[in-house]
């Protein structure tokens, strides 16, 4: 099943290094059936639960950063060293992705640290 993605979806993928959350894809007009077909036919691959890369091959560091933010949900953002890395303020890669408290409560990902409060921030470990 070959699917032409909407312009909104293509723009979203271009802005997010080829990474999209299921809730975003549905927001730009993709149905659950289309998303599942993209995954089943290996056009998309899971990065985190409910977050996918819209290409084959190994994801880049930037993909993992986008994936962590999208997994946390709307309103989430990178913080600390991860934000500095993305903005080019440091060349040193953090061993974890730091995400601040997201609006509405705890992180959605069980793999993110549950250490909420100040100054602790949740983080998600990176593969190998």
Image (cartoon, rainbow, N blue to C red):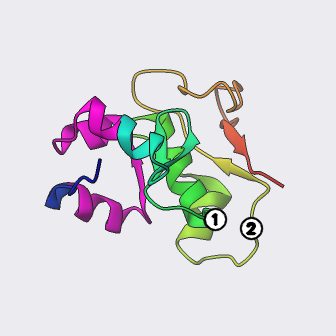
| Cα distance between the residues tagged 2 and 1 | 9 Å
Residue 15 lies, in percent from the top left, at: 33, 66
**Nearer to us in this view, 114 or 34:** 34
Q: Is residue 59 above or below residue 96?
A: below
Q: Is residue 74 visible?
A: no
Q: Which residue is mark 2?
A: 93
Q: Is residue 102 visible?
A: yes
Q: Which residue is mark 1?
A: 61
Q: Residue drawn at (47%, 61%), measured in percent from left and top?
A: 55
User: Could you tell me which secondary element the residue under label 1 belongs to?
Assistant: helix
**Nearer to us in this view, 1 or 117:** 1
Q: In the rendered structure, does residue 10 fall within the stretch colored magenta?
A: yes
**Do labels 2 and 1 touch, CB within 8 Å?**
yes
Magenta stretch, residue numbers: 9-35
Q: Is residue 41 above or below residue 128?
A: above
In the figure, is residue 35 to the left or right of 51? left
State which tag comes first along the sequence, 2 or 1: 1
Residue sitting farthest toward the front: 1
Q: In the rendered structure, does residue 24 fall within the stretch colored magenta?
A: yes
| Residue 34 location, quadrant | top left
Q: Residue drawn at (58%, 43%), measured in percent from left and top?
A: 99
């Amino acid at each position: 099943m070959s699917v032409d993605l909407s312009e909104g979806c293509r723009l979203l993928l271009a802005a997010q290094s080829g990474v999209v959350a299921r809730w975003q894809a549905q927001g730009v007009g993709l149905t659950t059936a289309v998303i599942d077909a993209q995954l089943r036919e290996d056009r998309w691959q899971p990065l985190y639960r409910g977050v996918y890369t819209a290409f084959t091959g190994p994801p880049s560091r930037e993909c993992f950063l986008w994936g962590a933010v999208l997994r946390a949900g709307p309103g989430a953002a990178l913080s600390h060293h991860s934000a500095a890395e993305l903005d080019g303020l440091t060349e040193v890669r953090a061993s974890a992705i730091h995400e601040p408290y997201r609006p509405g409560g705890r992180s959605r990902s069980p793999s993110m640290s549950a250490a909420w409060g100040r100054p602790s921030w949740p983080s998600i470990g990176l593969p190998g």
